[in-house]
């Protein structure tokens, strides 16, 4: 936790985006997390993503639950809307906010405790309903805020800083998502912005629930020998066979599609996710193949990262529900709340 | 690129831009921190160690440090380093007990210094504590050399000059006033072990145009001679209309002195456009503030003398091409005047050095002097200051004096002159605890403080009224915080790095990058902020343990805030105080000079 704020230096030659903003305009308050926390790198990747996409800060809504991870929305895009919900209750808030305003980009930051323990039910229904939001799990395998107990994502045999090795099977949000019909599943590593930033951009463009499981080491309680979520372990066991590029809407697509059958996915807003390389026989639209590949690698002690599964054909929750397209905040009050007489009339229909 | 060698003191020295630019390598950030703490005596002594005349230089230095200052690259204005030096000098108390003890038993070596200017005084300052007997020959009746004769009192009060020269003379210099040396041979015959020539560049350049010698009573003066006459009170007035030819710092002193001696309409005539002026920008500003006209693109053609009396001067009005290399004459004008002062440069003159002494003269009839040792081709004769290689400024003369003293010390002890100690350094961690540093690491956005001057209505009352009032306590407090502490270095230990990116994310100027190694041009392209300033080095770490990539730091606009070190979970980054160890004559055989107070330290350190 730094003693001073990050100063603004008048002549530091910072480039500007299409809105005339520098990357510093997308920052938030100073982080109060431990020095070296992976979450701060995820924060920096989000800052870079929104700056490069030239998203107006006022068009962003930041959501979170409780935990170290859930503190982080404070540390990026200070000009955005924000809501810190109760522990694990981010998805219902996002669903409601989405109904009220369909024009914002919803980005939720959660952790393995917030998402895979107390909030797992909400996460599963968020996936199932395809709520339109970016959902980041800052996954460090440990309850950092309560001093380092193993979490639901800790691998079998992973050792905490003190005490016995973990004996329980981990919950893997990616394979969980595959079984629940998720439409966008990615895994990345906080120490690799070159991979994380394009994935974040694709997630922002996705029309539905974009789940990104980011291995984000806890530098205080889970970065030691014997941990399977440390910087060192990730660098030794990460497999980056699935590689994607994000091509924004306005860019003319010139590059040739490589001969090895790489796929392109056109996103809802017209931007393109291009799979630069995938393992032989891999199809990012085939749930079964993707799960088989991930489980095979897991069996070998490897952690697969990249944009692993994407399906752009499924409608998001409010399209499915027929919620007014312009958002409930644009519906005149008299229509939104027609009064007790209308209610009585409606109830009469059910009698 | 190869990993940076941080063991080489010159790497971190270059990061301290001011100290690198200063010919005497004054520890600027060190003394600014001492001023910030109110330790003016310590700040003064730290200055004195390298530049010997803090009070004088705090008013008159040419300030090579300020254009180099990192703060200029950060907010457009350098720290007012020179003004802060004056603060230390003005507010210091009695420093007598911090001066070296001069051994009562001499070492038997006798050194002659010709001239009592800054370079000679520095030689004496460095050699007297080692037991040398120093005899100084001065042509006038007071010490100071050019600092006395060419810098007017309204810029440098006599009291300041007297006290700082007297400190050295009191170390036991056998000073001979009114003793102009007319023959080096005669002096050498007196059997000195070494002779140091510090006579400056005493001859002002002549302008031999038609009419120059047609006057009955001369109203055309050579600038430095005229200033000298003013300094000694031989000249007390000048005509109403004065033309100064030339636009260097001497011209600025001439025009401002004229203003105080009765001149009303004063014009400084320049051949070339403003951006090619030799005068320091602040001296130009001060002259213009006093109502002096600066006239550009006028080349002197002829002195207009009527009936033996100077009445004006004729100029060609020029138009220059871009870069001011070639000119065309547009017209010719005559500007009426009562007096003309020629300030077009000065040169060396050694009519008093016989040419058969084994002392070789080279190009432009200048003595051949070794650039490092200051030794002439005659082993016992050394040159320094303007006498060595032509006019520079005081801070250079001091730097020369230190080097010449080392050479003289070696020469007198039969040590080869090229056996000179290299620069050394100390690096000490400034970490005091969690997010606690022993220096003020927060960036302070204060603008550069402006020096207050005596009001224009009162300024010209007398020649010795100092114009600059010095910084107030409030101004000082603000200005010291503008210093970025460049000497508190970001020291990186690659084996500790876990590549978490924390430092890269927090850096306010995005000067850090972790990337694969490459050639310099390629690396500069791949930085977090591609580097525009090629004069500033890139720091390249050893390969990092986890991925083999390297940490690259662009030194250009690092503000030394220490946030990288605060955010580093493994202390791979640390903020370490760099203290340059400059060798002086006393360092040669590790002599420890006691000070009068009996305290064992050689100098004050922050």
Image (cartoon, coloured by chain):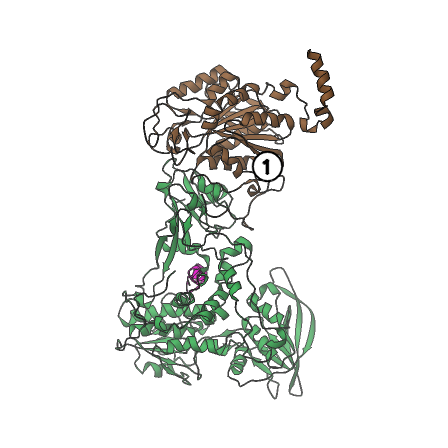
Chain colours: A brown, B green
Q: How many marks?
A: 1
Predominant SS of the magenta segment: helix
Residues shaded magenta: B19-34
Rendered location of residue B577, percent (x, y): 39, 54
Q: Is residue A183 visible?
A: no
Residue at (37%, 28%) from the top-left corner? A228
Rendered location of residue B376, percent (x, y): 36, 71
Q: Is residue A195 magenta?
A: no
Q: Is residue B283 left or right of residue A190?
A: right
Which quadrant: the C terminus of chain A? top right
Please name the residue that numbered disc 1 is placed on: A80
Q: Is residue B513 left or right of residue A300?
A: right
Which quadrant: the N terminus of chain A? top left
Chain of the residue that carries numbered disc 1 in the rendered image: A
Please tell me which residue lies in front, B243 or B353: B243
Mark 1, Cα crowd under 10 Å, few <14 / some 14-19 / many 20+, is some
Residue at (57%, 78%) from the top-left corner? B257
Residue B449 versus residue A190 in the image, above or below: below
Residue A232 versus residue A120 in the image, above or below: below
Q: Is residue B315 visible?
A: yes
Instruction: Give the structural element (helix, strand or loop) at label 1.
Output: loop
Residue at (43%, 34%) from the top-left corner? A145
């Amino acid at each position: 936790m730094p003693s001073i704020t990050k100063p603004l230096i008048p002549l530091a030659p910072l480039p500007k985006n299409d809105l005339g903003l520098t990357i510093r305009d997308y920052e938030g308050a100073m982080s109060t997390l431990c020095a070296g926390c992976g979450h701060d790198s995820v924060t920096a990747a989000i800052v870079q993503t929104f700056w490069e996409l030239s998203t107006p800060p006022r068009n962003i809504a930041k959501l979170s639950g409780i935990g170290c991870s859930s503190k982080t929305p404070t540390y990026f895009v200070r000009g955005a809307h924000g809501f810190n919900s109760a522990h694990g209750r981010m998805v219902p808030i996002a669903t409601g906010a989405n109904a009220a305003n369909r024009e914002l980009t919803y980005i939720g930051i959660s952790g393995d405790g917030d998402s895979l323990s107390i909030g797992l039910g909400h996460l599963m229904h968020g996936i199932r309903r395809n709520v339109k939001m970016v959902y980041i799990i800052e996954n460090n395998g440990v309850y950092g805020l309560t001093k380092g107990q193993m979490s639901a994502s800790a691998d079998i045999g992973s050792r905490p800083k003190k005490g016995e090795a973990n004996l329980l099977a981990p919950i893997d949000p990616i394979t969980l998502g595959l079984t629940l019909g998720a439409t966008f599943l990615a895994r990345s590593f906080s120490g690799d912005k070159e991979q994380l930033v394009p994935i974040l951009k694709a997630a922002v463009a996705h029309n539905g629930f974009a789940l990104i499981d980011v291995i984000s080491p806890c530098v205080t309680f889970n970065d030691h020998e014997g941990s399977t979520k440390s910087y060192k372990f990730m660098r030794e066991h990460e497999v980056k066979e699935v590689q994607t590029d994000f091509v924004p809407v306005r860019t003319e697509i010139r590059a040739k599609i490589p001969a090895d059958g790489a796929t392109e996915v056109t996103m809802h807003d017209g931007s393109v996710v291009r799979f630069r390389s995938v393992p032989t026989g891999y199809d990012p639209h085939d749930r079964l193949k993707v799960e088989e590949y991930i489980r095979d690698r897991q069996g070998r002690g490897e952690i697969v990262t990249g944009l692993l599964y994407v399906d752009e054909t499924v409608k998001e929750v409010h399209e499915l529900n027929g919620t007014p397209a312009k958002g409930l905040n644009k519906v005149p009050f008299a229509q939104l709340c027609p009064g007790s007489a209308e209610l009585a009339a409606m109830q009469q229909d059910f009698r | 690129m190869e990993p940076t060698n941080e063991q080489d003191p010159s790497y971190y020295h270059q990061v301290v831009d001011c100290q690198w630019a200063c010919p005497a390598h004054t520890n600027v950030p060190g003394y600014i921190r001492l001023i910030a703490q109110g330790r003016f005596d310590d700040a003064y002594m730290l200055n004195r160690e390298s530049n010997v005349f803090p009070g004088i230089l705090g008013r008159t230095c040419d300030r090579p440090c300020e254009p180099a200052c990192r703060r200029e690259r950060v907010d457009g204005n350098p720290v007012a380093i020179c003004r802060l030096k004056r603060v230390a000098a003005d507010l210091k108390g009695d420093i007598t007990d911090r001066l070296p003890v001069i051994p009562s038993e001499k070492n038997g070596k006798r050194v002659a210094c010709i001239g009592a200017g800054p370079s000679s005084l520095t030689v004496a300052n460095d050699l007297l504590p080692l037991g040398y007997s120093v005899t100084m020959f001065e042509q006038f009746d007071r010490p100071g050399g050019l600092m006395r004769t060419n810098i007017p009192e309204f810029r440098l009060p006599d009291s300041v000059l007297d006290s700082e020269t007297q400190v050295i003379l009191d170390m036991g210099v056998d000073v001979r006033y009114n003793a102009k040396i007319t023959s080096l041979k005669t002096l050498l015959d007196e059997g000195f072990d070494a002779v140091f020539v510090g006579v400056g560049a005493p001859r002002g350049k002549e302008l031999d145009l038609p009419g120059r010698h047609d006057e009955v009573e001369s109203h055309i003066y050579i600038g430095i001679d005229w200033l000298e006459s003013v300094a000694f009170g031989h000249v007390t007035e000048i005509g109403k209309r004065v033309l100064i030819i030339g636009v260097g710092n001497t011209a600025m002193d001439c025009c401002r002195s004229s203003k105080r001696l009765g001149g009303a309409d004063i014009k400084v005539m320049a051949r070339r456009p403003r951006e090619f002026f030799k005068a320091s920008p602040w001296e130009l500003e001060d002259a213009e503030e006093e109502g002096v006209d600066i006239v550009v693109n006028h080349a002197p053609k002829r002195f207009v003398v009527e009936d033996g009396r100077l009445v004006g001067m004729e100029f060609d009005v020029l138009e220059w091409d871009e870069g001011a290399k070639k000119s065309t004459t547009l017209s010719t004008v005559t500007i009426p005047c009562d007096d003309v002062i020629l300030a077009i440069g000065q040169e060396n003159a050694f009519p008093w050095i016989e040419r058969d002494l084994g002392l070789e003269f080279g190009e432009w009839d200048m003595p051949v002097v070794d650039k490092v040792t200051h030794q002439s081709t005659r082993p016992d004769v050394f040159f320094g200051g303007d006498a060595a290689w032509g006019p520079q400024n005081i801070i250079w003369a001091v730097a020369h004096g230190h080097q010449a003293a080392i050479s003289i010390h070696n020469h007198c002890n039969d040590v080869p002159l090229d056996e000179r100690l290299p620069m050394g350094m100390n690096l000490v961690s400034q970490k005091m605890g969690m997010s606690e540093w022993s220096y003020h690491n927060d960036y302070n956005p204060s603008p550069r403080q402006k020096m207050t001057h005596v009001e224009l209505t009162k300024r010209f009352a007398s020649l010795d009224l100092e114009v600059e009032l010095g910084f107030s306590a409030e101004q000082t407090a603000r200005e010291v915080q503008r210093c970025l502490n460049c000497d508190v270095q970001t020291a990186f230990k690659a084996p500790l790095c876990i590549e978490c990116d924390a430092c890269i994310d927090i850096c306010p100027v995005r000067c850090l990058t972790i990337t694969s190694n490459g050639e310099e041009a390629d690396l500069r392209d791949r930085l977090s902020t591609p580097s525009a300033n090629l004069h500033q080095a890139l720091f390249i770490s050893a390969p990092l343990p986890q991925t083999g990539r390297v940490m690259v730091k662009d030194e250009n606009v690092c503000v030394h805030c220490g946030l990288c070190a605060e955010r580093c979970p493994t202390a791979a980054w640390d903020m370490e105080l760099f203290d340059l160890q400059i060798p002086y004559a006393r360092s040669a055989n590790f002599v420890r000079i006691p000070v009068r107070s009996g305290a064992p330290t050689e100098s004050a350190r922050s």
